[in-house]
Amino acid sequence: MPQSDRTLRILSTSDIAGLEIGLTDVVSVVEEAYRALADGSSVTPPKLTVKPDDGRSVAYAMLGRDGAREVVAVKTSYKHGLKLDRDRQHYYTSLTLYDDTTGLPVAMMDCGRIGSLRTPAVSALLARECAPPDARTALVVGTGTQGRLALPFLLTTLPGLDRLLLSGTHPDGIRAVREQLETHAPGRELEVVTDLRGAAAEADIVLATAGPATPAAIEADWLKPGALTVLVGHGIQPSTLHRADRVVATSAAQMKVTGTDMADADGAFPDVHAELPAVIAGRARGRTDPAERIFAYNSGLVVTDIALGHRFAELAIAQGLGTEVALWQ
């Protein structure tokens, strides 16, 4: 990978969009990043958050090192207009990578596609490790960026799923979910549900990926014994966490930073029984009983962004994509 100590390769949204990568490859890269974190070769400090009192915006900064790829990176994320409709919001996220073997910069890139792939891949890994035995029915709540690839990724780690349910209110989003499912799993049927309580009662896996304005609000007593609930965005109530038999998180610390809307009236969270990196490494168990209801919290760990971003950088540089900027000249 050619590098310079005076220039920085910029990979734009269109550069990243044109790169081909399979869902199985994405899952493998993300899983490798978690294994490196579990064995101690990776470092991911808690994310920093800035949010004005009026709730107009939220910004995050995440620094980390992926020991598997020996890459250091910083990711920034900024969203403005949290209370506005999606098409009126402003959202920017970027990732800057440095090679920790040569000490040289690798690339700075738009991180939108990386997040849209990494997050459902993490949910799929949580489902693989925590779903009830012989899970057959999955319900996705929400049709935004995270909802559109949720089912294809779930089928990547749990191909035995045979009933796929979707709760959404936006026609364009529902259509996009159908298109992604047909692209990655041709012939699979999608059921769009209007009775959310009834659908939740039948689901072995519930993925809550909706935006903050969603009317969806699944309660703990809607869920059947053994159900797994994965929180990515919104669509489930705090009771699903506080009344769960077992809690698994990608990071217990980050859940307390980014999941404040799931805290109880005193601002407290129940104990996290296991973290995903340790589960993947075989040092903890995702599920301990077929009948336990499990709540899983999917918060992005920057090591997964680093690993997947570095893979995209490898692909882009091999194809000569990007623009070299003389940043340090």
Image (tube, rainbow, N blue to C red):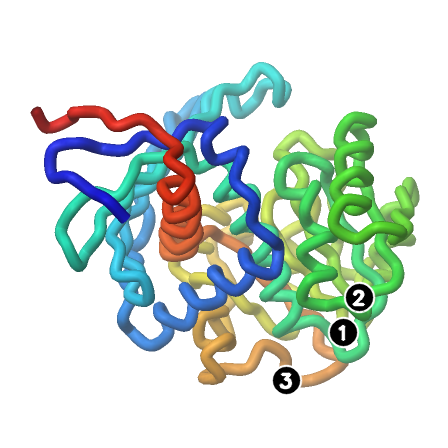
| Disc sitting over residue 204 in the figure | 2
Crowding at mark 2 (Cα within 10 Å: few <14, some 14-19, many 20+): many
Q: What residue type is labelled 2?
A: Asp
Using the image, determine if residue 253 lies above or below residue 194. Answer: below
Labels 1 and 2 touching (C-beta < 8 A): yes
Q: Which of marks 2 and 3 is nearer the N terminus?
A: 2
Q: What element carries label 1?
A: loop
Left or right: where 9 falls relative to 203: left
Relative depth, front residue between 6 and 236: 6
Q: Which of marks 3 and 1 is nearer the N terminus?
A: 1
Task: Report the residue at 19% width, 56% height from top.
Answer: 100
Q: State the image coordinates of residue 164 (x, y, percent, origin top left).
A: 84, 54
CA distance for labels 2 and 3 = 16 Å
Using the image, determine if residue 138 lies above or below residue 215. Answer: below
Residue at the farthest left position? 329
Q: State the image coordinates of residue 17 (x, y, percent, origin top left).
A: 53, 33
CA distance for labels 1 and 2 = 7 Å
| Disc sitting over residue 226 in the figure | 1
| Disc sitting over residue 288 in the figure | 3
Q: What element carries label 2?
A: loop
Task: Report the residue at 57% width, 69% height from top.
Answer: 247
